[in-house]
């Protein structure tokens, strides 16, 4: 279980994340929604300890994550894998090597520098790619792939870390609708089949409602909604996104009701 207590991140006088409290059970698919600047990415970066909080605590299964240092912190970052909007692949390397980079945390310094991966690790990488329908691209350069394909390779690389938690920071923001659907279905499948907790920052309500068990809405660094997506009513949506989004939600609900009738 992931527990967040009064988590705060300040940049000067600005509170990017402001006393966020959160409990996430194992195996949940959690969507974090809000406008740009609401604090979504800062929250995920603190969970992974890519950014240190100004105040507050993060605990996982009773361990104080905010106190970890050195090798223990590196192990936490492996257990709490992160997927980024811009993929962060090494374009000149082939796909399978990019996936294998997810195992570097389990190697010593010399082995990491020489990329000396075992046959078992290579087999694991192919299996990870196969789950995402990407095994046929294993020997291609990463920079020859489409955006959606690159994001699936990034997911396979994250899975090579054997994580307990998968953090996805706007994983579909730069993708077309078809590839966005493929990536979200992959994350949902990993969540369901492997029991891995997935916490995903999303811009759109429709995506959160389609794929997430639970949604957190953020506004100016604070949580203003926490519950199932079905409970996102118009006043809450207006507070999270503004008037236009609330009107779109109302139209969506009306269309759904008319179709059902």
Image (cartoon, rainbow, N blue to C red):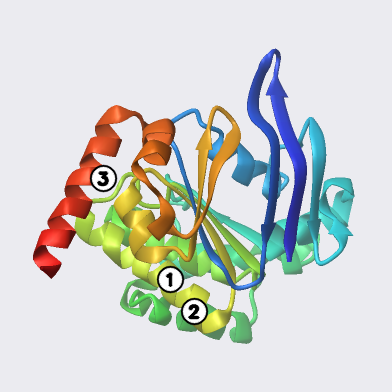
Q: Secondary structure at mark 1?
A: helix
| N-term mark: 3 or 2 | 2
Q: Position of residue 47 (x, y in %)?
A: 69, 49
Q: Are marks 1 and 2 in contact (CB under 8 Å)?
A: yes
* Res 35 seen here: no
Q: CA distance from mark 3 to mark 2?
A: 27 Å
Q: Residue at x 62, y 60 (%)?
A: 81
Looking at the picture, tell me which residue is in the foreground, 12 or 215: 215
Q: Secondary structure at mark 3?
A: helix
Frontmost of labels 3 and 2 is 3
Give the residue pinned by disc 2.
Answer: 192
Residue 21 versus residue 227 in the image, above or below: above
**In the picture provided, is 81 more to the left or to the right than 107?**
left
Looking at the picture, tell me which residue is in the foreground, 111 or 159: 159
| N-term mark: 1 or 3 | 1
Give the residue pinned by disc 3.
Answer: 249
Q: Are marks 1 and 3 in contact (CB under 8 Å)?
A: no
Quadrant position of residue 178: bottom left
Give the residue pinned by disc 1.
Answer: 188
């Amino acid at each position: 279980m992931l527990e967040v207590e009064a988590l705060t991140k300040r940049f000067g006088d600005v509170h990017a994340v402001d006393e966020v409290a959160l409990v996430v059970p194992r195996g949940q698919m959690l969507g974090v929604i809000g406008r740009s600047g609401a604090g979504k990415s800062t929250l995920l970066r603190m969970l992974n300890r890519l950014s240190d909080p100004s105040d507050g605590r993060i605990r996982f299964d009773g361990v104080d994550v905010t106190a970890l240092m050195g090798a223990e912190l590196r192990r936490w970052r492996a257990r709490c894998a992160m997927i980024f909007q811009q993929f962060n692949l090494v374009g000149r390397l082939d796909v399978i090597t990019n996936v294998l980079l997810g195992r570097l945390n389990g190697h010593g310094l010399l082995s990491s520098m020489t990329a000396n991966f075992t046959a078992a690790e290579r087999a694991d990488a192919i299996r990870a790619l196969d789950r995402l329908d990407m095994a046929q691209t294993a020997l291609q350069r990463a920079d020859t792939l489409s955006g959606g394909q690159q994001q699936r390779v990034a997911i396979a690389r994250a899975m090579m870390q054997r994580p307990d938690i998968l953090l996805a920071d706007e994983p579909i923001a730069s993708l077309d609708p078809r590839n966005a659907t493929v990536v979200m279905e992959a994350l949902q499948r990993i969540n369901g089949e492997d029991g891995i907790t997935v916490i995903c920052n999303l811009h759109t309500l429709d995506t959160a409602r389609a794929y997430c068990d639970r949604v957190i809405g953020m506004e100016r660094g604070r949580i203003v909604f926490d519950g199932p997506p079905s409970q996102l009513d118009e006043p809450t949506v207006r507070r999270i996104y503004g008037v236009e989004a609330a009107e779109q939600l109302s139209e969506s609900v009306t269309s759904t009701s008319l179709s059902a009738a």
